[in-house]
Image (spheres, helix red, strand yellow):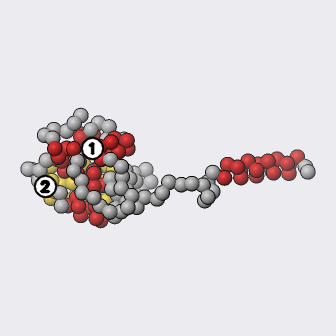
Amino acid sequence: MSRRCARLAAALVAGAVLLGGCSPSAPREPRRTPVPDEEIFEAVSQIPGVESHTLSYNTNFGSTGYNGDVIISQDADPYCVLDTTLALLRQGRAYLSVSVRQGDEFTDPWDLDSDLPLATAFQERYGPRTDDGILREVDPPACHTTAPSQ
């Protein structure tokens, strides 16, 4: 066998070993079924104090995830509305960039907890994500306090 054939054979064997971890027979995590977006958006519309929202799921490269604003009445608790919205959205697909707007004021996830942009903080605050596509009622922490926990 020529040297060139030997190198080609070695490269093929190395490639096969590396790709072996990607084979369909390798164990995988179970697939998660998120709650449909429309169902979550309707639930957000039903939160007391919500007047409207511009929520959507963006699939553009670099900014994939839920985004938009939830517009609330002047007498609504922006922390409770945001916390409830985030807990509902967490039952859907991943990644959140959502704010609550009350007049000219915005309330963002880091106003509830400075760690909330981190996935682990969402896990700690709202518990494990559902995987069966069924929307569950939520009872987030900000709805039980007068000020956000920092």
Question: Under tag 1, what secondary structure?
Answer: helix
Which residue lies under the disc numbered 2? 49
Q: Nearer the viewer, residue 107 or 150?
A: 150
Which x, y percent locates residue 35?
A: 34, 62
Question: Would you call the spot at circle 2 few (<14 residues within 10 Å), some (14-19), or many (20 or more)?
Answer: some
Where 109 sits versus 85, above or below? above
Which x, y percent locates residue 58?
A: 37, 57
Q: Is residue 43 left or right of residue 56?
A: left
Q: Marks 2/1: CA distance?
A: 18 Å
Where 82 sits versus 52, above or below? above
Question: Would you call the spot at circle 1 few (<14 residues within 10 Å), some (14-19), or many (20 or more)?
Answer: many
Figure quadrant of the C terminus: top left
Q: Is residue 21 left or right of residue 1?
A: left
Give the residue type at disc 1: Pro
Q: Of callouts 2 and 1, which one flags the residue occurring earlier in the amino acid sequence?
A: 2
- Which residue is painted at 63% across and 51% down in the image? 21
Question: Under tag 2, what secondary structure?
Answer: loop
Q: Quadrant of residue 24?
A: bottom right
Asked whether the beta carbons under mark 2 and mark 1 sit within 8 Å of each other, the answer is: no
Which x, y percent locates residue 139?
A: 21, 50
- Which residue is painted at 28% across and 65% down in the image? 39
Where 6 sits versus 23, above or below? above
Give the residue type at disc 2: Gly
Which residue lies under the disc numbered 1? 109
Q: Quadrant of residue 123?
A: top left
Outermost residue to the left: 75
Asked if residue 65 can be seen in this view, the reply is no
Q: Is residue 142 left or right of residue 125?
A: left
Where 11 sits versus 135, above or below? above
Q: Nearer the viewer, residue 10 or 64?
A: 10
